[in-house]
Image (cartoon, helix red, strand yellow):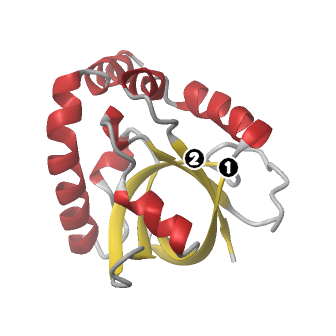
């Protein structure tokens, strides 16, 4: 537990926010490729997916490693009663507390049908931006799940986008 607290403290620093976006995704992509989708380095602390989406402007395929908050299955031990009754995850557009929204969030707004690689399985999903009370409830759960997201939100004026992705 002490190790997790240390990582949470480090991940809340501005230095981490400058370096991590360049290092962590590159490492995750390489390890994911080498292990044929069975392993993500960053998932040793937080659950993670590789999001395969369509570029908002380019229309080209994009693959982005992301931390996620599972809502169903063994990760949480509970069912949330999502509209599809299947697995769902919350994706957090924190961008490590940097000013702009991450590009993958624009991709999902333009093209909500995507695929996630989850524990070695490619799963077709549909993404939906959370708003209002639904977002408020999800944000509360996200902060309980990984408290550094509060630091990221405090650093920026934009509202961090939250998406629920649900198995199609």
Left or right of residue 143: residue 14: left
Q: CA distance from mark 2 to mark 1?
A: 6 Å
Q: Is residue 37 left or right of residue 22?
A: right
Residue in the picture at 15% in, 49% down: 22
Disc 2 crowd, CA 10 A, few/some/many (<14, 14-19, 20+) = many
Q: Are marks 2 and 1 in contact (CB under 8 Å)?
A: yes
SS at badge 2:
strand
Estimate the x, y position of residue 62 in percent, counting from the top left.
34, 75
Q: Residue at x 17, y 35 (%)?
A: 18
Quarter location, residue 37:
bottom left
Total marks placed? 2
Residue lying at 25% horizontally and 58% vertically, measured from the top left: 28
* 47 sits left or right of 38 in the view: right
Name the mark on residue 1: none
Residue 84 placement (x, y as % from top left) = 81, 68
Numbered disc 1: secondary structure: loop
Q: Is residue 129 above or below residue 11?
A: below
**Which is nearer the eye, 17 or 10?**
17
Examine the rendered structure and indicate whether residue 154 appears above or below residue 126: above
Dot 2 corresponds to which residue? 162
Question: Which residue occupies 32% across, 37% down?
Answer: 99
Provide residue 81's location: percent of width, then percent of height: 85, 54
> Which disc, if any, is residue 130?
1
Is disc 1 surrounded by few (<14), some (14 to 19) or many (20+) residues within 10 Å? some
């Amino acid at each position: 537990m002490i190790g997790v607290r240390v990582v949470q403290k480090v991940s809340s620093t501005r230095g981490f926010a400058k370096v991590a976006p360049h290092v962590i995704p590159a490492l995750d992509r390489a390890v994911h490729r080498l292990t044929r989708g069975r392993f993500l380095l960053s998932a040793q602390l937080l659950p993670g997916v590789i999001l395969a989406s369509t570029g908002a402007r380019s229309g080209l395929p994009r693959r982005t490693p992301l931390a996620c908050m599972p809502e169903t299955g063994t990760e949480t031990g509970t069912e949330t009663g999502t509209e599809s009754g299947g697995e769902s995850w919350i994706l957090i557009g924190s961008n490590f507390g940097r000013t702009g929204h991450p590009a993958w969030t624009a991709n999902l707004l333009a093209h909500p049908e995507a695929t996630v690689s989850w524990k070695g399985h490619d799963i077709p999903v549909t993404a939906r931006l959370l708003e209002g009370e639904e977002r408020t409830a999800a944000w509360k759960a996200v902060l309980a799940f990984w408290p550094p997201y509060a630091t990221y939100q405090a650093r920026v004026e934009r509202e961090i986008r939250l998406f629920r992705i649900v198995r199609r």
